[in-house]
Image (tube, rainbow, N blue to C red):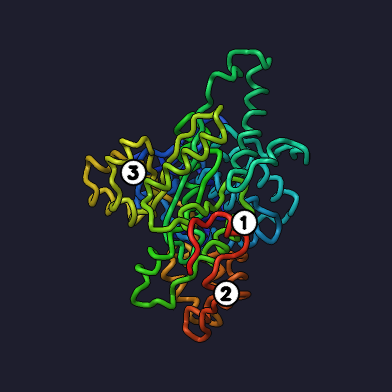
Amino acid sequence: MAFVASSPDLLKDIDLVEVESSEATATTRERGGGYSPSAVSPHHEETKITIGHEGEAPTFAISQRNRLYQILKRLSTIATIPEDELVDAEIGDVIKFLVEIESEQSVAVIREKLSILVKDGSPSKHRSLVRPALPSHHPVWSIQYPLLKIAQNLEHLQGLSADSAGPANSPASSPSKKTDVIVLVSSGAYNPIHMLHIRAFYVARQYVESNYKFPVVGAFISPSHDTYVRVKNRRNPREMITKRHRLALIETAVASSSWIEVDKWEITRRRVLDYLSTLTHVREMCESHFPRYRVHVMYVCGCNTVVKLSHSALRDEGFGCITVCRPTQTDMVIKHLGKTLSKTTTIVEDTGVLPCDLERATSFRVRQALSNVGANANKIEMMVGKPVFQYFMKHEIGEKIAGKVSWTEEDKQWRQEDLTYVEYTES
């Protein structure tokens, strides 16, 4: 996203003052620098950037993507951007930071400003940027997949609480008092997974931790049963990526995350299950392993899924719902759900600055691009990320989707590491 004004050179000499909306302020500064949108964020088209010299009448500029994207590309060659941290930065801070460093030549200065942005721009009140490594003999390492990441985050959260609560025998640290935490869950075909699937979790976590007092300690991606995916791709059956590879692709996509994990439970059942069964499973699994915590499970979905949900069932079962929409989708969702149902889910607008290929990413577009990998390599990598793209290439997923290479018997079988979780085995 870049700024355009009456003169192309205008922004070389002006200061970014604030980001505001004609309906409501797009961001709210909280302690530590938080992004606290309302349940429905302001429309992207109505967002204005106020710029101008001190004492002069302000000028409003419409935002475009390309300029800030080019600055981001330059920044990525200078400093490593920690995914878990910068993605939580307030969008106003990100824009201001990128404009400030556009003409900065000193690498040291850029890195220092980036460090300040990461430190002050995160809305999380529950995580510190530097985590002490747990010793190899620590009990948390005995926790089995898929709960290990949550266990590590709970251990870290407990350490932060102990530091702020004072002596171990204080009422705040009483073992009889359960601590409320949130776990996010998303389900679907993931045929294949792409970066917007992952991004939805970050947007949801950012909203939750900016507006609620409970921390998000983990998230699960629950891929659907092969039967469900087969029905969705009945017109083009070769475009169905088998369970073996769908699982591996998700694992590859979340391998670097400290809090997102794939849950194999749904995909390994005997039959197709609904989202309520998956949410119930996650809640029971977390509560049985972490009895000291009261786990609130929230379903994260997109605009195409939320209109199919039973909102009364979600409410009756005690599950929350967060719908992550791009700016152009919000009105459609509210119109389709109506005023009553739109209040049963929190609609969060993702107004992030994204490259065009990434913003338009869908599993269907990824499969389309994979049918001609040679011509679309850069586009595919933008939509799915480098590790997933490398997996595509290694296992010839594009050639198999295009019908140039047949899916093998091995492709259709479970991996050895998945067999432990399989409720059934095909004869």
Residue 233 screen position, x and y as percent: 37, 72
The amino acid sitting under disc 2 is: Glu
The amino acid sitting under disc 1 is: Glu
Callout 2 secondary element: helix
Residue 367 screen position, x and y as percent: 46, 73
The label number, if any, that marks residue 410 in the structure image: 2
Give the residue drawn at x 55%, y 29%: 291
Give the residue drawn at x 39%, y 69%: 230
- Determine contact: label 2, label 3, CB under 8 Å: no
The quadrant holding residue 374 is bottom right
The residue that mark 3 highlights is 22
Give the residue drawn at x 43%, y 71%: 365
> Dot 1: few (<14), some (14–19), or many (≥20) neighbours within 10 Å?
some
Depicted 326 relative to depicted 183: above or below: below
The residue that mark 1 highlights is 102
* 1 or 2: tag closer to the N-terminus: 1
* 1 or 3: tag closer to the N-terminus: 3
> Dot 2: few (<14), some (14–19), or many (≥20) neighbours within 10 Å?
few
- Most foreground residue, 52 or 189: 189
Q: Is residue 5 visible to the viewer in this orientation of the structure?
A: no
Residue 181 screen position, x and y as percent: 51, 33
Circle 2 or circle 3, nearest the eye: 2
* 2 or 3: tag closer to the N-terminus: 3
Circle 1 or circle 2, nearest the eye: 2
- Most foreground residue, 424 or 30: 424
Callout 1 secondary element: loop
